Image (tube, rainbow, N blue to C red):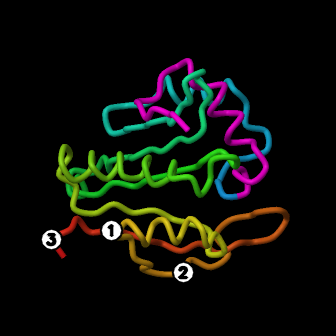
Amino acid sequence: MNYTIRPTEPRDAAGTAALRRMPGVFETTLGLPSCRTADSNAFVANLGPNDHHFVAVLEDGTVIGAAGLHLEGNPRMRHVGSVGLFVHTDYQNAGVGTALLKTLLDLADNWLMLVRVELTVFADNERAIHLYEKLGFEKEGLKRMTTVRDGKYADEYMMARIRPGLA
């Protein structure tokens, strides 16, 4: 499988929106079923200097994964970034998520000099938790009943990774 990881561009909005709505992906995000391509267009258009967003795309331009790193705006927290990640169901467990997250961590460690990268993940998303732990994230706590998902409240883990060599 040949794919490229590159910064998100306006032409990726439709593919990203379709990916967010995809069964098997949607349930692991904080999105709503009403997510439209216009929402993705606005998201891409409004990315600022504290937002770093990448997509994994096939040779034909199909978006098969997306990941973002957002830096805290508060000057006292400029050493902290938060990440989000999702991968097309047909490409899960194929290394796409690992490659996207490694891209974000390289940016965080070697270009932005972040100390802490954090995320939240649904407590029952074992595959994502495994990926995050494989790349150095640790569970810091359980946030109970934080999100409505399929008509029920779901728990999330707060996870973080301290840059290697600093902990």
Query: Where's the N terminus, which quadrant?
Result: top right
Callout in the foreground (2, 1): 1
| Position above or below: 62 against 25 | above
The stretch of residues the image draws in magenta is: 1-27
| Position above or below: 143 against 5 | below
SS at circle 3:
loop
Q: CA distance from mark 2 to mark 1?
A: 16 Å
Residue under numbered circle 1 = 161
- Front residue of 40 and 9: 9
- Residues at discs 2 and 3 in contact (Cβ within 8 Å): no
- Residues at discs 1 and 3 in contact (Cβ within 8 Å): no
| Position above or below: 148 against 54 | below
Q: CA distance from mark 1 to mark 3?
A: 10 Å
- As drawn, is 62 to the left or to the right of 134? right
Residue found at x 45% / y 32%: 4
Residue found at x 46% / y 29%: 8
- 42 in the magenta segment: no
Callout in the foreground (2, 3): 3
Mark carried by residue 130: none
Residue 126: x and y in percent read: 61, 73
SS at circle 2:
strand
Residue under numbered circle 3 = 166
- 25 in the magenta segment: yes
Mark carried by residue 142: 2
Residue type (three-letter) at the residue carrying disc 3 = Leu
